[in-house]
Image (cartoon, rainbow, N blue to C red):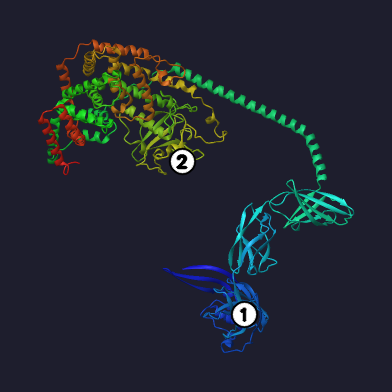
Amino acid sequence: MTLIILFFYLTGLHVAVKFRLGSTQLSEQLRLTNCSDISGPPSSVLCQQCIKAGCRWNTNRCSWADQTEINDSVCQNVQSGKNFSIPEISSITPSVVSFYGRNHAVLSGRNLDDVTAVRIQADTDCTPKESPVWDNTGFSLTFHIPTSDIKGVVNVCLLLPDGRCHGKAKITYSSLPSCTNITPSSSWISGKRKITLTGSHLNFVEGVMHSHTMHDVRLPRNISSQSLTYDSPEALSFSRSTMFLKVANKTLNCSTKLSYYPDPEFTSFTATRTGKDVHITIQKKTDKLEMTIDELSVWGVQDKPKNCTMEAKETSNNTDSFTCEIESPTNPEFQQILIKYGDKSVKLENKVESAVYYFLMLILVLLLTPAIIIAVVLFYQRQQQRLADKMNKFVEDLELNIRNDIRQGFVELQTENADLLENVGTIPFLDFKHFASRIFFPENESLMESCIKDISQDVVKIQLDECCQGLSRLIQDQLFLTSMVHALEEEKSFTIKDKCAVASLLTVALHSNLSYLTEVMEVLLKDLMQKSSNTQPKLLLRRTESTVEKLLTNWMSICLYGFLRETVGQHLFLMVSALTQQIAKGPVDCVTEKALYTLNEDWLLWQAQDFSSLKLKVLFAVGTDGEVSEPLEVNALDCDTVEQVKEKILSSFKAKFGFPYNIPLRDVCIEYEKNGLFFPLEEVDASSEVIGEVTMLNTLKHYKVNDGGTIKVLSKKTHPPLSPQGSVKDDENFSGKYFHLIDPDVDEDQTKNPERKKLKLKEVHLTKLLSTKVAVHSFVEKLFRSIWGLTLSRSPFAVKYFFDFLDTQAENMKITDPDVLHIWKTNSLPLRFWINILKNPQFVFDMEKTPHLDGCLSVIAQAFMDSFSLSEMQLGKYAPTNKLLYAKDIPKFKQEVKMYYKQIRDQSPVTPAEFKDFLHEESKKHENEFNEAAALKELYKFIERYFTEIKQKLDENGVPAELKEQLQHVKQSFDGLKSCSWS
């Protein structure tokens, strides 16, 4: 049901009620009356109107209905049949209306005092329409003529309170009005231009509206059936406006539109005396308004305005000229005229006087121009001097800062010594199975976990083991295994990731038989060499693009683990620890992890400001009664964030006591003692500095922590903070919401923190790379020499054996270029194994590698590989810094590498029996470290995927039928377990 408000007059609110039930719609017209609006001298008519509206009459007034109120005697007299004067109708104005009716129709006659409503009924209409009356004077009254659905004549009578209807008149309903033309077709935007509409039945129009100002109803003048005139409304911009005709309470669209243009622009006038009269000629710019002389009124301005009678209009050279005449003025001189069009008046000055005025203004400007130029020049010179002084001061400050930075860098280079701690306690080596699994499956944690997980021996697992044993026996056949690998690698869908996975699964499955694994690897390597020999032999083993190359990596990892742990591991850990400590010596940006002390230019915090070292006295809370431990001295920087201070405290604790603190970092909170009270230190709080929408992390300088200050370490679980706060690093938009030492790229008042706004040059801080290199260089040298040095004048068995294997293959392939052998050995050992260890110490130790540490280790690894390179580096001033850092050391390292290769070649060869014993011993050391069944199960998934291709390859290689039957049997065994054991 919807209510549509139609109109509201003093007689009430007229509404149309529409009911819709499916496709059926019913409507009814209602009038809602405000009881308090029915007022006036007490009369039977007023009382009857009150009762009819659903109100109550009491104490000579109409009020809202209430059960306690009763009607007064006035209405009782009406109800008892009081006699009323018979009303008569003289006329109805208007008596001819459109289908939409007419508002405010006037009915004249006699004895109209008791009339309560006007009844209108057509001859064929069963339900008469009643219209309430108002402004009843006894001789005339006002009412609304309602709408009609048909054309024709209807009867009108006057309704009395007793229900009788008297009088007789006619109202004729005719067609709706329409407009066909508009003159003129445009208006100036200030409005009030006289517009004439032509059409039919326009005498029914009560107002004209425009689309750009629907609330402004323009009342027509000079209205007739064929035309009407009205004043155009004002417009805010140039546009075309649609017109609407208001008929009763409806609007009709007019097919014509009115265009709006700028107001006419009058430029000048001339006054010419003709006898006693004065002719005025007014110039106006030509426009699209087509203004006529009838639309213009002109007066000459003197003591009293003199009317100027319009005579003619002429158009030439983009100018409209209007001529008017002032008859017999007292003074024939007119310096100003007043022009009126529409509702707007314009004063226009005589152009002769204007020329004089402009001439005087020009003289004044010419006189003032030199003075203005001199003032501008003086002001400009003064501004330039101020700018020059400011720039000189800026350059002086910049030079001073650069001098200080260079001097500080020079002092660090000359005084830097390896005072980093070498006593790092117990080295946290990973056991063999975790080391090997990280080498085997660096990007596949699920395979890593399944291959080192212990398996309980239940019935289902035993059955599964029987299937795996069948597969194990199958891969123990060298012909089958090599055929299978070749078949897999010939498939395009068998990716490099799949090749690495198969190689590692084979390593785990055959780990208990390293001798056989070595034989298979040699066969596959020979096949690979045959493929590479005809193209570019120097590229052999450079990348891991085949199964055997990954197999070689795994084989080296197994065979060199003992050498790594006993000889190289300590030097590697000391180097990583020294590098970590050197990075922590200077500022480290908590958000970007860039540091002032680094080996990698990409991670250089060259924007760092001045900082100071602090020695903090740290107390650890013991229990919940306020007891604390003995103080621990911790080194920190005043630019460290709260999170960084926590890390340094826990690191110092572990370095001193040899074991980590029993509470993890995220559960630790710290407090600072000030004036005998402890205040919590938080990463972000209400006092944090905010620049734009970015918040600076709180530092020790922010909290004004002094050198020698006391810090207490608490557990959040036993001492919950007043305002619990998780680490801000957990925020997904951490780097976008917070900053530390690198200012966000937003505008900021430089007077707030001038220290942070000092210009910094990255190149000045490149010496920090060199000072970091000097600090850790001894550790790097020891590490490198532990790798290519010979323990007891003997290289590891695996290295000697494999290098001899490469020498033999080069001989067999008649390769005489020594560079090829050098590259083969470099690609198989340093590039394939040692670089992986140098860049990923977390493979060897129980530690975390930060992105910054990874960047520094990449520089060291690059220097390591450059030491094995045969090409000479040509370095200039634009060479990358990671190459320049070790440029002077590389030639010395290269000589050591060449000596290393020569010493290995000159060693007595390892006999097959010795090497077999070595492999057997390595297998025995770690015989229960891996879950071979899990590896076999994963390996079978690849066999199952490429089963047809493997069978075809076996047929091509002419393998015995027993092997094919064994393969089919393995497939049947595994297929039988799919639904009950694994999928």
Image quarter for residue 708? top left
Helix, strand or loop under label 1: strand
- Up-down: is 860 above or below 137? above
Image quarter for residue 749? top right
| Spot occupied by residue 754 in the image (x, y as percentages of width and height) | 55, 31
- Up-down: is 646 above or below 723? above
The front one of 799 and 422 is: 799
Q: Which residue is the extreme one toward the left?
A: 962
Helix, strand or loop under label 2: loop
Q: How far apart are marks 2 and 1 (CA)?
A: 87 Å
Q: How crowded is mark 1: few (under 14 residues within 10 Å), some or many (20 or more)?
A: some
Q: What residue type is labelled 1?
A: Lys
| Spot occupied by residue 241 in the image (x, y as percentages of width and height) | 61, 56
Residue drawn 35% across the image and 33% down it: 629
Q: Identify the residue position indicated by label 2 in the image.
A: 685
Q: Identify the residue position indicated by label 1 in the image.
A: 170
| Spot occupied by residue 203 in the image (x, y as percentages of width and height) | 65, 69
Q: Quadrant of the C terminus?
A: top left
Image quarter for residue 231? bottom right
Residue drawn 49% across the image and 22% down it: 763
Going from the N terminus, do you reach mark 2 or mark 1 first? 1
The front one of 808 and 561 is: 808
